[in-house]
Amino acid sequence: MQCLYSHSAAPTSSISVMVYTPEHPAYSSVLESSIQNLRFNSSTTRGPRYIITPLSESGVKSTVICARRHKLQIRVRSGGHDYEGLSYISFKPFVLIDLVHLRKVHVNVKDKTAWVEAGANLGEVYYGIANKSNVLAFSAGVCPTIGVGGHISGGGQGTLMRKYGLAADNVLDARIVTAKGKILDRKSMGENLFWAIRGGGGASFGVILSWKIKLVDVPPVVTVFTARRTLEQGATKLVHKWQKIADKFPEDLFVRLLIMRADNGQGRKTVQVLFNSLFLGTTKQLLPLMNGSFPELGLKAEECLEMSWIQSILYFAQSPKGASIDVLLNRTHPRSSFKAKSDFVKTPVPEVGLKRLWKKFFQNTTGMIILDPYGGRMSKISESETPFPHRNGTLYNIQYYISWSSPNASQANWISNVYNYMTPYVSKSPRSSYINYKDLDLGKNVSASYTNAISWGTKYFQRLAKVKATVDPQNFFRAEQSIPVFAS
């Protein structure tokens, strides 16, 4: 506390408000407020020695300085969607910096830019944009309660990425606190660090304070649809065809797949595929396009809905029909215990492989697979532009996901079984994963220092490690899958 007092520019009264120890009556509620994965909300989970909720950039800076001085690790939380809880748990004594109070969104319609603080969630960013313009948007994820600090620094895929690239591809500037307690922007941090935090994960290099993002153009009317097809309705052939064409659709069209077990309506279990889409245009424009490139789906006008872009955010977030955009300001998220893994696919999975995959769904009721198509703008951005290597030649990303409400975690075995089954059909040498879908199973048989080589590949890993050695040579910002200091 004495250290915080001496290094903070904020009034002393503010310091006491933003520090929580285990003895503080609000400690548990503050800690649990953003824990999205209940796997990490138990009596056996080791909590932080201090929770700091800074009210300003100087509060973050002083926390970094004092944590380093007192040999405490740091975890940084913005939205709490970290799949493995790395943003709020550690096996060593640590300080949790919760950025819940740093979430301002300043939109400049004239310049088509916005400054967003790292503690803002996507819903707050989308809300801020929509209140200024109905024809501007930001290319990022579909879940409104995700914090922008981590989402953007890991890439940030979403429904507009085929048209405009990832969230990280639309960053113009950033502010970060380094291990030495310096606050840097793009000019002062240099292009190497600016490159690293746009896809390489910000937590390895410092604490992201804010992003300057580029807003993108959207039409006043967009079209969404969710076409549901079961195995009995030819879903296998539809998925097989989708793999070959989804990355080649016009950039204005994004069609992802959600695959799960369902009831076929006759009392029998089946597999259902949801073709979940956003089109930057009207239904009248969409139907000829779909009928020409994907007639097998048999999309009908009554399956389509026209709306504004901001309403499409609510649609993909599964908000109640007719809900106000004010729901985007709600920072709470339905919580459960869950586990996820990810893959990237470069060649279509054959029909026989899909049929065997479907059998896995009859072994579990809550497992889901989500396929997000790439191509379009994603294939045109150079692999060297950011440390996100999944560009030209990547057909789609897979997210394997399972949740459960009971304390029994054995259901997670299902996802490992499916992941192992998919080995022959996904990227190889190395098998790739999406950094924002954290998975601590990766690298268990690899030297801990080089775990992330699996995720980025050697060419990115070495460059990231060199940046790390420059900005954080003592490896102060470290976690289970952080970038290590390069050892030459």
Image (spheres, helix red, strand yellow):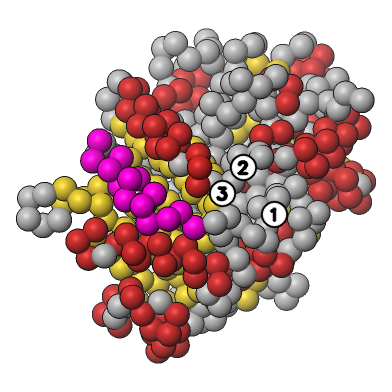
In front of the other: 141 or 378: 378
Residue range in magenta is: 348-363
In front of the other: 57 or 337: 337
What amino acid is labelled 3 in the image?
Answer: Phe
Q: Look at the image and tell me whether residue 191 can be seen.
A: yes
Is residue 106 toward the left or the right of residue 287 in the image? right
Pair 3/2: label in front: 2
Residue at 35% x, 32% y: name it. 414
Q: Which mark is residue 168?
A: 1
Q: Residue 179: which quarter of the image?
A: top right
What amino acid is labelled 1 in the image?
Answer: Ala
Q: Residue 320: which quarter of the image?
A: bottom left
Is residue 155 toward the left or the right of residue 332 in the image? right
Residue 161 is situated, as x and y percent measured from the top left of the image, at 60, 63
Pair 1/2: label in front: 2
Residue 229 is situated, as x and y percent measured from the top left of the image, at 26, 64
Look at mark 3 in the image and give the residue it sits on.
344
Upstream in sequence: badge 1 or badge 2 = 1
Q: Look at the image and tell me whether residue 323 can be seen.
A: no
In front of the other: 174 or 404: 404
What amino acid is labelled 2 in the image?
Answer: Lys
- Secondary structure beneath dot 2 equals loop
Q: Which mark is residue 428?
A: 2
- Secondary structure beneath dot 3 equals strand
